[in-house]
Image (cartoon, rainbow, N blue to C red):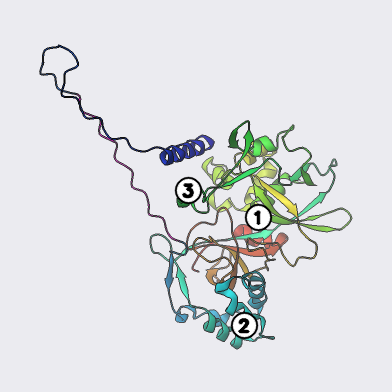
Amino acid sequence: MHARLIVLLALLLAACGSQPQKPTQPSSKPTCDCPALPIPLPEEPKPAPEKPTAPKIPDYGLLKPASWDALSTLEQDNLMQAWPAWLQSCSTLKTRQPWQAACAAAQNMVNPDQASIRSYLQSYFDVYQTTNVDGTDEGLITGYYQPLLRGSRLPTAAYRFPLYSRPDDLITVELTSLFPELANKRVRGRVVGTKLIPYYDRGEIEAPQGPLKGRELFWVDDIVELFFLQIQGSGVIRLDNGEQVHVGYADQNGFPYQSIGKLLIQRGELTADKASMQGIKNWASNNPDKLRELLNSNPSYVFFRELPPGLPGPLGALGVPILAERAVAIDPRFVPLGAPVFLSTTYPNSNKPLNRLMMAQDTGGAIKGGVRADFFWGAGNDAGRQAGAMKQRGRV
């Protein structure tokens, strides 16, 4: 992966810096006194046909105009429970011109009821259907949650596995300024001499003499729970004195996420129906000798920061606390971050309808595409069971 990335950058730079040269015209004057033999000139090699590239989809380019009739089940939801989540969105969106009127009106509403919220939505919003590249309108809906881990600020015999803060030598390069066609793309790495090279992967970071000694934020007692904390992006550390500390995403090492559940299926160690979060945890407890190698097969590594106390929920990508069962992570290329969205899916492992007004307040490395959402279930074990089991079809 690193080699391909470096080659890609090198090719891009070479392409930007070079200009095609005009072919040299052959001279009519012979260069020697050789007899004019009828020797055919070799044909110039034909250039390989260029592979067709998929056209770039513009921002929000997969949204299709729809009508309020498409939200016939909106009345089945308790819109008053969604209202605080919308006010959280407005705490940030109100400074942005396209949202100012809608947010000002929302903040002036006192104790709105079901009817007034619906009237407000119809007054300030149009309805759009999210679609996939192929035009279909159904996609994958998964779930996430806020794990609760036991931990310490200092290492002990019980607390042996570190959460690291963002390292000082981690460099992020935003490619948009160099290559506009790579909008929203970035490269992370570290500088060695005069070169930017890939950052350390998971195996290197978690080696016994790893490179991040001294950057430990907390120490926890379970490496598997720590792994899933990195997947979720935020969580709570409960200290021995009873204090609960919120930690949130600070950065990532630049490697793409690789699913260990998918790998266990490929190896024949789990069936697809058992490759849930709980199924992976059960496998880990039964295979401690294979665990480290499995975890290292996902080179992606997340760094954390300690969040202010008293937050009602973890901070999402919008920068506001997200509320349980009222926030979703989306792909911000196709759904505006912060917007109200109506999710139509089913509860985990069931056909029971789940139709709910949500707020698009978060993003995720695996949340890509037009019809794709990650449902935030809240904190703790019950939320974890729901999130780990959720892999439903749905519309947005």
Residue at horizontal 61%, vertical 46%? 172
Mark 1: secondary structure: helix
Dot 2 and dot 3 residues touching (CB under 8 Å): no
Q: At which x and y percent is residue 47? A: 28, 35
Residue denoted by label 3: 179
Classify mark 2: residues with Cα within 10 Å, few (<14), some (14-19) or many (20+). few
Q: Is residue 7 above or below residue 394?
A: above
Q: Residue 110: percent from the left, percent from the top?
A: 69, 86
Spot occupied by residue 280 in the image (x, y as percentages of width and height): 63, 48
Q: Amino acid at mark 2?
A: Ala
Residue at the front extreme of this rendering: 29
Q: Which mark is residue 232?
A: 1
Label 3 crowd bin: few (<14), some (14–19), many (20+), radius 10 Å: few
Question: Going from the N terminus, do you reach mark 2 or mark 3 first?
Answer: 2
For marks 1 and 2, give the CA distance.
34 Å
Q: Nearer the viewer, mark 1 or mark 2?
A: 2
Asked if the residues shown at circle 1 and circle 2 are in contact, with their CB atoms under 8 angstroms apart, the answer is: no
Q: In this rendered view, identify the residue nearer to me: 55 or 204.
A: 55
On screen, 395 above or below 21?
below
Residue 18 position by quadrant: top left
Lower position in the chain sequence, tag 1 or tag 2? 2
Is residue 290 visible in the rendered structure shown here? no
Q: Residue furthest right?
A: 241
Q: Identity of the amino acid at label 3?
A: Phe
Q: Which residues are magenta?
A: 42-58
Q: Name the residue tied to disc 2.
A: 105
